[in-house]
Amino acid sequence: MNDVIPKETDRYRSPDQRAGWIGLAVLIILVLIGSVWGALAWSSLEPGLQVLVGGVIALAVLLAAGLLIVMRAGGGEDRRAASRDSLYSDAFFKSIRPQLITRNGKPTLANRAYLDVVKQLDVDVLGDALPAVDRLFSTTEKDGSAAIFRLHHIGPDTKRAEEDINLVLPDGTLSRFRITVSRLAAGSGTDVVLWQIDEVDALDESESTLSNAPIGLFSVTRDGRVISINATMQRWLGGPEALSPAHINEFIEDPLILLDSEAVHGKTVRADTRLITRKGVVTPTVMIARWTATDTGDLIASVALHGHTSRPGADHRKPIAATQPAVGQMIEQASAFASVPFGVLHVDGADIMTARVTYYNKAFRNLSGRDVPANQSFLSLFDGATVQQTLAGHSPADMAELGAIDVLLAGPKAVPVALYVVPDPVIPERLWAYLVDISARKSLEEQVRQSQKMQAIGQLTAGVAHDFNNLLTAIRLNTDELLQRHPVGDPSYPELQNINATGARAAALVKKLLAFSRQQTRRAERIDVSEALSDMYLTLKQTLGGQAQLELSHARDLPAVMVDRSQFDNVVMNLCVNARDAMEAQGGGRITIESERLSRPHIKDQVLLAALRDFPSDDVVRIAVSDTGTGMTDAVKAKIFEPFFTTKDLGKGTGLGLATVYGIIQQSGGHLAVDSQLGQGTTFNIYLPAASEPTAEEKAAAIPVVVAERKPADLAGQGNILFVEDEAAVRIIAAKSLRKRGYQVTEAEDGEEALEILEDAVEPFDLLLSDVVMPGLDGPGLLKQGRALLGNARIVFISGYAEEKFSDLLAEEPDVTFLPKPFTLAELAEKVKSEIGEAQ
């Protein structure tokens, strides 16, 4: 940029002054020339001419001297005026305050400080043209542009005006500029204005009260640069307070929760995260942020952190000195709290029992959902006696030591909040109360409690199912043995067959319990959701009958999912049957099954995004089963997935249908949600992660090979079997049945006995048939310790638990097969025959 400051020789001297001095110089030169000529020609002139020439020369000298005296007298006045002008001009050009003079709105003169601001703000300049103030703040929007416009159009009688503009500088810092205009001359079509620019602190002095609030506060730009931070946050981070963090990722564990959120003016983001101090201490905390658009159009997030559990040092508890008079202080402080993202109350009265509310901010009104009448009791704002019991007997000075108090805010919303009470730094008999919404934290705690309860029920259910499977196996094996002695036509056959059928129903019930506890054996495979639902359509129509109308709607290009096909069918069937039963009282209705493809980046529901956080793929398949029934209350919705909970009449439901559905979806890595309102029906939404693209090997393995299923016609065989089972009722009948079919069976009631038998065996065993869960040495442990003694023997494990329960232990034994309990004698014989055949 060329320097627009005039040269020193041209800055103060006017053109008229310069012309006068030039004329005087010419006159003196002419007089000198005439005098020299007269002196040279003096001797050749006649006496009369000598007198005339001498008089002319003397007159010319006197005239020149007189003009010189007059010019010097006038020049002295000009020099004095120029001296004064020089003093004023130096004050303008050498001032450290950026200044610009405009004539009729056009820039005419600027000082060096103004040009420095132009460079600081990275303003493009064309040629030698001076940029106007408008160009310096061209990125401003709304209020900023309006401020510049008002300064340009001050009235003719206004001598001085000023405006403040907030601006994010090119280096990412937030600054506030105060622009002042002063009219120097006006009239006769000339309007001369002086523009002056001052850079002031971005934060008002009244906002300094936030510095010691018991909540960490800071502000960041859209890309995460920290532009301000309060003293509490600095203390939490530790280290020198002068060393402020440059980026949010230096102290927030997962900053993308905020930075990847939708940055819209007024948008509030709430999330659980962890604070990382400079010493590496990691502490759980709750982050509440609000995006705000500045005058420049930049988006800044104002962030509050609370829940930090570290106790501050002694120096952090020093009383705040009162630097301003008490009069009007509360109003200034209140204005600073007007836009903070947490509730603030000002309380009059050191005794909390009688304290009255004198001020509350907008965030508190939004939090409580109501306005607070003037001088309302502070305690009346909360449900219960927690505040009274916690704060009673404490002086205002030591209330800050109590930390956060979890209370329930009274009102239409009944919002749980963390309450902090601190003394007013200026007026001792008053208090400030800060309220932070902890609904998300409470909801998470409730989810954790519910999850723990369901996990405990699941563990209990799995244990009961395992033991029940042992009993059912013994019942079914003994019944099968009796049926061989009492065939069709025998008087005892119907009763025995009834026992067998009842055992099969009990086995189906145990499968539901295992599905709920996520212990059911599953065979995941890639399935096309559209094809699977279409294949089920006719079966569903027949099951639902004529009262319920079934509609099926598929989206295009649905990705495949990895689920157990039989379990998937079970889920859809359960949901449709429940929907039919929900519409029975109203004489029927419509059931709709819809499927669609969702992309995680386009999902706006934060609760759903949190539930899908662990999905391995951004593509999600949603399957919705909706009905037009009576709907459910919130109380019912909270319990529908619990085992044995049912709203059906006695004898019409076990209460395991939805518990089974929930367990299957969770075991498949999906998510199940319900949306229901009374009188508006119910929708169950199933979310399953899209399966990854298969490898070339998986594609080759997926090519169907047609093999005729062949069950052995003769279940008799030969071979040496080691049968290990701690349940005597199962072991005795199973071993007896295998011996009748020609096998040589050695029984062991636990792993230790089986290991001793292997060590003392003379003949090798062809098959090890072992239970998985046994006291002492279990089945997998027996396999690891006795593998060398088993030689080439085949291994079959039996268990009432799912195969997945112990699959990790058998990862190194790919030849091991599995037979789930309960099983029949025929199934046992078929399994043994397929493993060892006619072993010699």
Image (cartoon, rainbow, N blue to C red):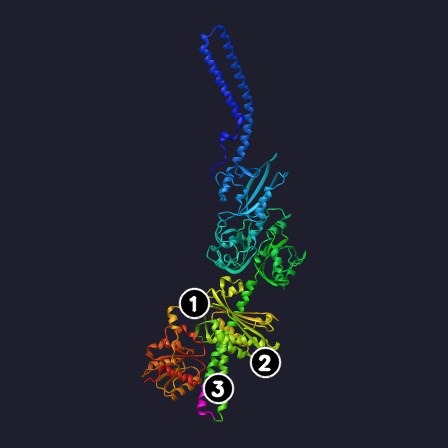
Amino acid found under the numbered disc labelled 1? Ser
Of residues 282 and 254, which is closer to you in this image?
Answer: 254
- The Cα–Cα distance between marks 2 and 3, rounded to whole angstroms, is 25 Å
Q: Is residue 487 magenta?
A: yes
User: Residue at image x 43%, y 73%?
Assistant: 525
> Do callouts 2 and 1 mark residues in contact (Cβ within 8 Å)?
no
Of residues 666 and 122, which is closer to you in this image?
Answer: 122
Q: Quadrant of residue 402?
A: bottom right
Q: Is residue 284 above or below residue 741?
A: above
Task: Give the image location of residue 101, x and y in percent.
Answer: 55, 37
Callout 2 secondary element? loop
Callout 3 secondary element? helix
Viewer-nearest of discs 2 and 1: 1
Q: Residues within 10 Å of mark 3 (few under 14, many from 20)?
A: many
Of residues 13 and 82, which is closer to you in this image?
Answer: 13
Amino acid found under the numbered disc labelled 2? Leu
Task: Give the image location of residue 596, x and y in percent.
Answer: 50, 68
Of the numbered discs 2 and 3, the one sitting upstream in the chain is 3
User: Residue at image x 57%, y 54%?
Assistant: 213
Screen quadrant of the C terminus = bottom left
Q: Is residue 284 above or below residue 487?
A: above
Residue that badge 1 annotates: 692
Q: Residues within 10 Å of mark 2 (few under 14, many from 20)?
A: few
Amino acid found under the numbered disc labelled 3? Asn
Task: Give the image location of residue 265, x and y in percent.
Answer: 56, 55
Q: Is residue 444 above or below residue 514?
A: above
Of the numbered discs 2 and 1, the one sitting upstream in the chain is 2
**Label of residue 650 in the image:** 2
Q: Is residue 193 above or below residue 766?
A: above
**Label of residue 63 in the image:** none
Residue that badge 3 annotates: 500
Of residues 139 and 106, which is closer to you in this image?
Answer: 106
